[in-house]
Image: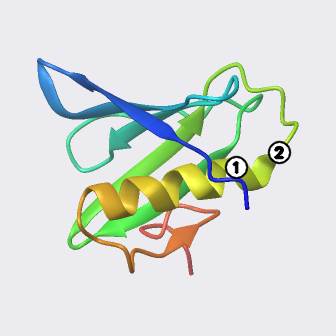
Amino acid sequence: MKRDVFLLAKDPDNDCRNIIYHRGGTLKVYVYCLDIEHFEPNPNELQFYTQNHKETLAFETCDYDMEDPGLVIEAIRWYARYIDNPEMEIYAEDPRTAN
């Protein structure tokens, strides 16, 4: 079974601003804390959202070729384990505005 390896780059000036990299490919996913920063979704990229306890996070691909959208979900699941919240649910829309 192939196991994908992800790496995390942290912004030294912003604890919430992280970038998830797929070591074996071109996937790069930006992480945004929606409660403390503005996020304008790029219509050419994939976006997903989560609730990390009371904090809403957005995940957006960067220049991704969309060859394996499931890999984006896998990267977010990896990040959820990294931040010690493996049960974190992943949403296609911002849960703060979903009806």
| Quadrant of the rendered image containing residue 68 | top right
Compared with 43, 63 (above or below) is above
Compared with 16, 71 (above or below) is below
- How is the model colour-coded? rainbow
Compared with 91, 61 (above or below) is above
Quadrant that contains the C terminus? bottom right
Residue 34 appears at what percent x and percent y?
32, 47
Q: Which residue is drawn at 37% across and 62% down?
A: 80
Q: What element carries label 1?
A: helix
Mark 1: few, some, or many residues within 10 Å (few <14, many ≥20)?
A: some
Q: Residue at x 20, y 70 (%)?
A: 54
Q: What residue sits right under mark 2 in the picture?
A: 68
Which mark is drawn over residue 42? none
Compared with 52, 8 (above or below) is above
Contact (CB < 8 A) between labels 1 and 2?
yes
Q: What element carries label 2?
A: loop
Give the left or right position of residue 62, taking residue 59 as reference.
right
Q: Which amino acid does label 1 sit on?
A: Leu
Give the left or right position of residue 65, taking residue 86 as reference.
right
Residue 65 appears at what percent x and percent y?
83, 26
Which mark is drawn over residue 71? 1
| Quadrant of the rendered image containing residue 33 | top left
The residue lying furthest to the front in this view is 1
Give the left or right position of residue 94, taking residue 79 as reference.
right
Residue 97 appears at what percent x and percent y?
49, 67
The residue lying furthest to the right in this view is 67
Closer to the camera in the image, 35 or 68? 68
Closer to the camera in the image, 15 or 83? 83
| Quadrant of the rendered image containing residue 44 | top right
Residue 3 appears at what percent x and percent y?
63, 53
